[in-house]
Each structure stands twice: as structure tokens, then as C-alpha cells.
Image (tube, rainbow, N blue to C red):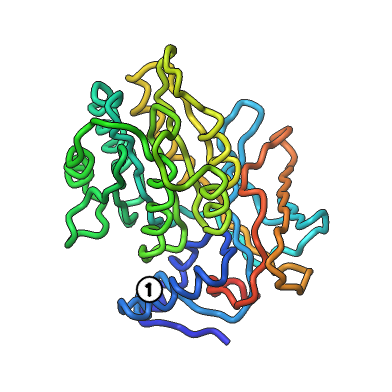
Amino acid sequence: MLKFSRGIARGVTLALAMVCLIVPGTLAQSQAAALRQGRASDPYWISVNVDLVVLHPTVRDRKNRFVADLREQDFEVYEDGVRQPIRLFRHEDIPITVGLVVDHSGSMQPKLSEVIAGARAFAQSSNPNDQMFVVNFNEKVTLGLPGDIPFTHSPVELERAILKAPATGETALYDAIVKALERLQQGARDKKVLVVISDGADNTSVHNLAQVLQTAAHSSAIIYTVGLFATDDRDANPRVLSHLTQATGGQAFVPEKLDEVVAVCERIARDIRSQYTIGYVSTNPKRDGLYRAIRVAAQTPGHGKLSVRIRPGYIAGTESRRVPDEAAK
């Protein structure tokens, strides 16, 4: 049974702020926190007792151009090799909660001006209803925004947040990502994204890469990375950033020049805003905590071969998930 909040007329259109909800414990905590913070009346939120898996595929053609005119019948969704009936389909620009995770180790000092310009471009190219925050890190991990401003869409506030931390010391990349994934859960948008900007491998975190990948797999976040690697950087490890993006359906970028950071950030914003929303209820009724592999294919006359990028799977939980009202077809 659907439970509608106030402002439902507008909420029906905007309630598609969803990603693949894969950990019931995290979801239950997020929903409880939402109720405590009064989000039950937020028009972006609608509840339904259907176990809907929601994906946000990015579709491109042979020339790497976004394909924006596909229909529901142009998609096929498979879970563990079994085709799934689509219950939800939309192609709309929906608001997100997004964290900018910015490396402030000593080697980043000459690069911060370009990073700030990129953050400003990202904000200006994003949905005006997005909620943004900043996590700064060197050997310490800190939130960039003031305590009384949990989220913002202001380029000026984002710039101040990045400048707040000094560029010195070593790199706690893994700890910063874990902190940012936790912070994402406090956002009021169900579609959640991290943009990680770093120039080196981790050398001082408490967490290791396996733990970060596990945490990412247990979250709904899509992770994009921007690797600012110097050619003589012995600590550079672009494979780490690539692993994070592949596990979550995001994309890794390695600009050859610093002045390309702005264009990369603008491209990430366009990628996020160009994604489809597809939902299905798994034909496998078990909620056993095991990993389920997902594949999405797209084809339609006139477009040739299409490539689809999504997060590659989810963990089947034991709780009902909050989903958009279109799930009740």
C-alpha cells in the first residue's frame, strides 16, 4: 500500500530520486533518520512495500554520445542471467545528494585552484535541487561545510569548503571515502553520488581497499573519480580509483593536463543528469544477503551498437525498500 506524503502532486513527478537500494540495514537507518528529521513530508519521498531494485544506467552509442531517446521496450534487464520484467522506467533529470571528496595532501597544493574551478563548474552544471557537501582529507578527514550547513548548492560555499583545509601531509583516501559514504546517508535525495578527486594512492588510512570496496558495495552510491597523477608520482595508483568506479557504476577520469579538470567535472555532471531510471522486482524471492549480478542491455533501430554502464550488482536484503510510486504498475 502506498503511503503518500504532503505535496504529493509534485512528489509523483520528483519521487524518482532512486538508486539501487541494496542494504536493508542502511536503508532502515536512513529512513528512520529521515522521519526524525521531518522528511516524511518531503515531496521527494514516497513509501511502498515492494522490493524494487532501482538502477540508473548511462547509455552511449559507438561515438560515445549519450543516447537520450530510448523507450522501456528498448531495455532488457538480467539478474544472475535471468531476465527480469521492468516495473519502473523514467528518463528524467532528478536531484541527488553528492559528496565532493578532495585530496589535500601536500602534493595537491599547486592543483587546488583547478580543483576549485572544477567543483564550481560541477555545481553550475548540476540540478539546482542537488544537495552537495565536501569531505577534505590529507592524513586527517574533515567535513568542509560549517556545522550549521549540512548541504549546499552554492559554488561559493563549495569553494570555501575546499579552501578550509590546508594542503599538507599524507593521504587517507580510504578513510575519506568511508566518511563520505556515511555522510551521504544523511541526505534527503535517494540518488547518491561521490566525486573523488585525488593525486595518489593511500598511505595512512585505518581502512584498507577491500573494506572500502565492501562498504561501497553495501551502499547505493555511484562513485566517479578524477585522478590527478603526475608522471613521476611513485604513489600513483589509478587502478584503485578504477576499482571504485567499476563496483558502483561510475566512471574514472585521468586528465592529462590540469586545465582539463573543469571539463571533466562538467562531463560528470552531464553523465549524472543523462541517466535513465529502471526498476524491477527480482524473480528470485530469497533475501539471503548474497550478491546478485546485474546486466542491462539496450538496443533500438537506428542507433547501432549501444553500451550500457550500471552498477554490476547488489546484495539481496531482508527488508522492504522505499521506492517511487510508479513501481505499483
Label 1 is placed on what type of residue? Answer: Pro
Q: What percent of the width, then of the height, locates residue 188?
A: 37, 66
Closer to the camera, 97 or 269?
A: 97
Q: Image check: 155 left or right of 122?
A: left
Quarter residue 156 falls in: top left
- Identify the residue shown where x is 73% and y is 67%: 282
Quarter residue 184 falls in: bottom left
SS at circle 1: loop
Q: Image check: 310 left or right of 105?
A: right
- Identify the residue shown where x is 45% and y is 18%: 234
230 shown above or below 80 = above
Q: What percent of the width, then of the height, locates residue 16?
A: 49, 64
273 shown above or below 117 = below
Q: What percent of the width, then of the height, locates residue 6?
A: 36, 82
- Identify the residue shown where x is 41% and y is 42%: 205
Q: Which residue is mark 1?
A: 43
Q: Quadrant of the C terminus?
A: bottom right
Task: Point out the residue furthest to the right here.
Answer: 82
Q: Residues within 10 Å of mark 1 (few under 14, many from 20)?
A: some
